[in-house]
Image: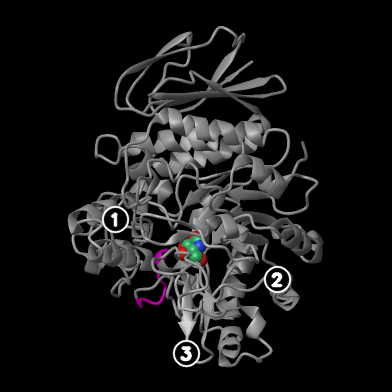
Amino acid sequence: MTKQWWKEAVVYQIYPRSFNDSNQDGIGDIKGITEKLDYLAKLGIEVIWLSPVYESPNDDNGYDISNYRAIISEFGTMKDFDEMLQEAHKRNIKIMMDLVVNHTSDEHSWFIESRSSKDNAYRDYYIWKQPNEDGSPPTNWGAAFGGSAWQYDDNTGEYYLHLFSKKQPDLNWENPKVRDDVYNMMTFWLDKGVDGFRMDVINMISKDQRFPNGEIQDTGYGDGSPYYLNGPRIHEFLQEMNQQVLSKYDTITVGEMPGVNAEQAKLYTGENRKELNMVFHFEHVDIGNGKYGKWTPEHWNLTELKTIFSRWQEGLEEDGWNSLYWSNHDQPRAISRFADDSEAYRVLSGKMLATCLHMLKGTPYIYQGEEIGMTNVAFESIDDYRDIETLNAFRDYTEKNLLTEEEIMQAIHKRGRDNARTPVQWSSRANAGFTEGEPWIPVNPNYKAINVEEALADPDSIFYYYQKLIALRKRYPVIVHGKYELLAKDDQQIYAYTRKWKEDTLLVICNFSSDLVSFNLPNHLEFVDKTLLIANYNVDETEEIDSVELKPYEARVYNLR
Ligand code: NOJ
């Protein structure tokens, strides 16, 4: 076990567009973040992961970058950024940037050059291919936001690859000049003083150069993922990036990796591999995906969730490191997705989820608004949605008659990305105190009851519960380093586990249901002394725990010695 600061830290994700608007134009901005640093310091987080703030035409809200070294004007200036960084550091908060280098915007100067002619010096910065003989795209691959992954360009009569929207052309990592430019850009930001990177879909950067067709899916397109996920040169590229850039700084790195499993994660995060600190996997957030993935959501079981988490906990026990998250800007709100957002149980179940996640082994991530228990939103009209993925899915699935409008709207309410992108609810004032202008996306109508002001005024709020969880992490090394063991494996309502470190045994018991359930302590757990560290109900601390009656969504953590 090596002691590293990023193992001890809790990370807070900011999606700037929806965080806090300082100039009342309806769009969150960098000064808005600076204004709230004291709030974040109060919560106790030590790292901010900042979703992209770079220049972008916003086809995918900043995940389509047209200039990696400039700040998008609607978020402010480089001076605002430098000031934010300085103010964050003053409060011992580090800044982790979003690094989006699988693709750029089609408005990036590299792409403008690249598409201008076949012999342009930047042609090879992207992936260009001749059409098939019948004029069709080079492979049958579908893009993540619908349609083919190839876009024909009239100007030179070739197709370019875009695994996301057609305004997000994929960079050609085979080209050493591309890699050098990316490494120089990373160095630019690290020299400025940023503390690390969250790397967008980084396991997609190495493509199988044979470019085979994929197996045809229900959507009519081929699945290209076997040929671009964890591709042939991925480890070579990441080791090179580490050697040329990361190894020269003390950074935190996390790679977003769709389709990664725990075995592969060991290769990405193993201590001696010199690649990344941790990865974001998708196994738990994809739970219940149906025929059309998240657009046909199905019922999921707690035992499945426990199996997934346990596989990752055990898989990375000896080597590598986990990241822990329920939600982010691409996912629905944690409470609505994994617990119960009804009035009766929102607060209790929000605290339960927080307990369950923060006591696991790994670095916990809090998505903005999670700390006050924000919930999903259900706009009635598709016109209130802004996300390209959501809007394209609505159009494609209804046009092709794969889903009815009602079905796709229901799925959007459950799983759409805009659930996480409605503005942070700061107060009960107009627009939840996010802006005095017209917000770029409507606020969740429940802001009068659920907001930061309310949470800070209530000692029993979810906010103070998170604050306590973070404080416990700093006090008890067992929370950072303890070895995980799953208890009551087959129980459909209770997720219970222990974490062992030196003479401490953390016992975590979480009821994921609204039923009263009993938990029986396994015989092999011996102890003479127990301390209740945190609970979301009032618990009599002297109560015997051989058999515990749990209330709806009850969560308790004991330290046993
Ligand atoms: C993952 C990001 O989190 C998501 O928001 C984005 O749309 C895709 N990658 C493409 O960059």
* Magenta-colored span: 18-25
In the image, residue 58 sits, relative to residue 144, either above or below, namely below
- Residue 15 in view of the camera: no
Whole-Å distance between the Cαs marked 2 and 3?
25 Å
Q: Are marks 2 and 3 in contact (CB under 8 Å)?
A: no
Whole-Å distance between the Cαs marked 2 and 1?
37 Å
Q: Nearer the viewer, mark 2 or mark 1?
A: 2
Mark 2 and mark 1 lie on one chain; the one further toward the N terminus is 2
Q: Residue at x 63, y 64 (%)?
A: 207
Residue 292 forms part of the magenta stretch: no
Can you tell me whether the CB of the residue at mark 2 lies under 8 Å from the nearest atom of ligand 1?
no
Q: Residue furthest front?
A: 133
In the image, residue 274 sits, relative to residue 110, either above or below, namely above
Q: Amino acid at mark 3?
A: Asp
Can you tell me whether the CB of the residue at mark 3 lies under 8 Å from the nearest atom of ligand 1?
no
In the rendered picture of this protein, how many numbered marks are placed on residues?
Answer: 3
Helix or strand or loop: what does disc 2 sit on? Answer: loop
For the rendered model, the colour scheme is one colour
Q: Which mark is residue 174?
A: 2
Mark 1 and mark 3 lie on one chain; the one further toward the N terminus is 3
Characterize the local packing of mark 1: few (<14), some (14-19) or many (20 or more) Cα atoms within 10 angstroms. Answer: many
Q: Which residue is mark 3?
A: 154
* Left or right: residue 475 compared with residue 418: right
Q: Nearer the viewer, mark 2 or mark 3?
A: 3
Q: Amino acid at mark 1?
A: Ile
Taking depth in this image into account, of 293 and 483 the one nearest to the observer is 293
Q: Residue at x 32, y 63 (%)?
A: 393
- Give the image location of residue 524, x and y in percent: 60, 9
- Give the image location of residue 37, x and y in percent: 52, 60
Q: Nearer the viewer, mark 1 or mark 3?
A: 3
Q: Which residue is mark 1?
A: 412
